Structure formats: C-alpha cells, structure tokens
Amino acid sequence: MPALRALIASRHELIGVLTQPDRPAGRGRELRASAVKAEAVAAGVPVAQPVTLKTTAGRAEFVAWRPDLLVVVAYGLILPAEALAVPRFGCLNIHGSLLPRWRGAAPIQRAILAGDTETGVSIMQLEAGLDTGPVYLERRIPISPHATAGDLHDELSQQGAAALLEAIDGLVAGTMQPRAQPAAGVTYARKIDKAEARIDWHADAEVIDRQVRAFNPQPIAETTLGGESLRIHRARLATAPEPEGPAARSIPGQLLGMQQDALLVACGTGYLALEVVQRAGKRPVAARDFVNAKPVDGLRLGT
C-alpha cells in the first residue's frame, strides 16, 4: 500500500477510496476488510465498496465524490467507460512493467519467468484497452538473479508510489504530457495458472530456478516426493558436484544429498539447491531440517 500511504501523506486531497467488498476469511469464514480499507479508515478517508462499477447504482457514490483524478492500483474490477469518464483529469494506473512489455495481469511473474534482467513501473493513463494507454513516466530497476516475485513487488510498489506523485504533480501543473506506447515490443502477461507452478525436473536448472522465484509468494512452485506434494519456497542454482560422484550418473529429479545448507537436485541440465521446502500440511522448513526429519537418500522428486 505504498501508493495509498503516499497519497494520504501528500499535499493532494484524497476524497475517497474504492476497494472491493469485505470477503470471508479464516477458519470461521468471517467477513474481513481488505488492508486497503483498513488503511483508509485509519486515516479518516471515506471508503466505498461497490460490487460493480458497471451499473449506475454501483457508480453512484463514486460519482457523488466528483473526483478530479482517479488512481487505480490492482483494483481487481473492470472499470467501464462510464467510470473512466468521471474524473476531469482521467484515471492513472500504476503498472508493474515497462510498457508495452508485459501488459496484463501478471507482469512481475512473467518478467522473472522470461529471464528479464530489467523491469520497472509505468504510470499510465487508463483507457478501454488492456494496459494500452499512454505513459506519463516510468521508473526502471534491475532484476536481481535472486529476486522473487514478492521481492520485486515490494520494490516496485515503493518506486510506483514515488513516480505516481511526480506524475500527478506534472499532470495538474500541465507540465507533463503522456507518450503513446510504441507498437513494437508488445507482450502479454497472462494470469498465472496454478498448474504452471508444477516443476518438470527435465527442464534446465535456470528455468526451474526462475519458476521457483516467480511463484513466490504464490502459488509456490510444487513437485512430488513419494507421491506426496512438496512445495519449493526457495532455491538457488548449484555448482556441479564431483564429476566422479553419484551425481555423474543422476537422472532429473534425483536428490543428491546436502550441498552446504541446501538439498541438491539434478535437473535436465544443471543442478538446483533447495533451501526452503514444505510438505503437505506442514510449515515451510529449511532443507537441513527437512532432511534430518525425513531421509531422502536415493529418492527422486516428481514421483
């Protein structure tokens, strides 16, 4: 919520917050407010929670606010043209990629999966198309070879909040004009399917490493061991073991023992060292604790 906090603390008047309705959560399935709502209420900002903005009734409270500008950050509901037309300065969106690369729902995960070395945030004008609007400004950051989607999300959220305030100031002052997105370089970041988190140990170790990082904190990369689910929370690329050791004759998915503090696994090409794993119904644990509790010599993942 860095963007919301930045707006609350800024010189601009935040007249209201739109967020989705409270949802059932926890074992008791009691209605629970979103973190966005809680933050807004704590700051004394009015909150509206329409089920949809596609109807006149659903937009009524938003329209009554008569906003000059609407800022959209991972709202999760479709904004119809009628809603986009309400603010006189239009609608700004913080998008987690360098547009037009990775338009769509999962730009952070897709950037990691593709092996991108750079990403960023784009402050764009919302329009009817999917992330097709002109861009006011962008902030670029490198993607660390060890960064998870969660790490990138947090860093981009901070960058996006600062860039948003800069864009709003320029928009209101009339000193900043958006640029149309180029026609070349368009890619789409489709929504993540949980099935994509299933690891194929015949793949290259670098591909699997990206998979583990892209799906942390959710849905978490997954494999099987002895027919039971095993989730891989953290891993790293590993150096090749001794050429004359058992790994020289290993097959994809074979567990090769501990390498320092991690559990070594053979891949189609190369090796991966598992650092944090989670058995079904259990909490995530360090690889050393996992091995101490369950001997894995000679076992193979994916079986």
Image: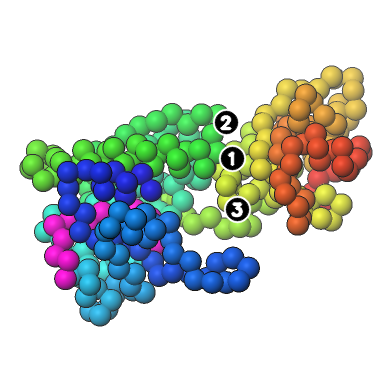
- Residue type indicated by callout 1: Arg
| Residue for badge 1 | 213
Q: Secondary structure at mark 1?
A: helix
Q: Earlier in the sequence, mark 1 or mark 3?
A: 1
Q: Position of residue 57 (x, y in %)?
A: 25, 80
| Residue for badge 2 | 146
| Residue for badge 3 | 219
Q: Earlier in the sequence, mark 1 or mark 2?
A: 2
Q: Position of residue 4 (x, y in %)?
A: 31, 49
- Residue type indicated by callout 3: Pro
- Residue type indicated by callout 2: His
Q: Earlier in the sequence, mark 2 or mark 3?
A: 2
Above or below residue 217? Residue 20 is below
Q: Nearer the viewer, residue 47 or 101?
A: 47
Q: Tell me the number on the disc at residue 152.
A: none
Structural crowding at the residue carrying mark 3, measured as other residues with C-alpha within 10 Å and reported as few (<14), some (14–19) or many (≥20): some
- Check if mark 1's residue and mark 2's residue have beta carbons within 8 Å: yes
- Outermost residue, left side: 174
Q: Nearer the viewer, residue 174 or 285?
A: 285
Q: Secondary structure at mark 3?
A: loop
Structural crowding at the residue carrying mark 1, measured as other residues with C-alpha within 10 Å and reported as few (<14), some (14–19) or many (≥20): many
Kindly indicate the quadrant of the structure image that contains residue 52: bottom left
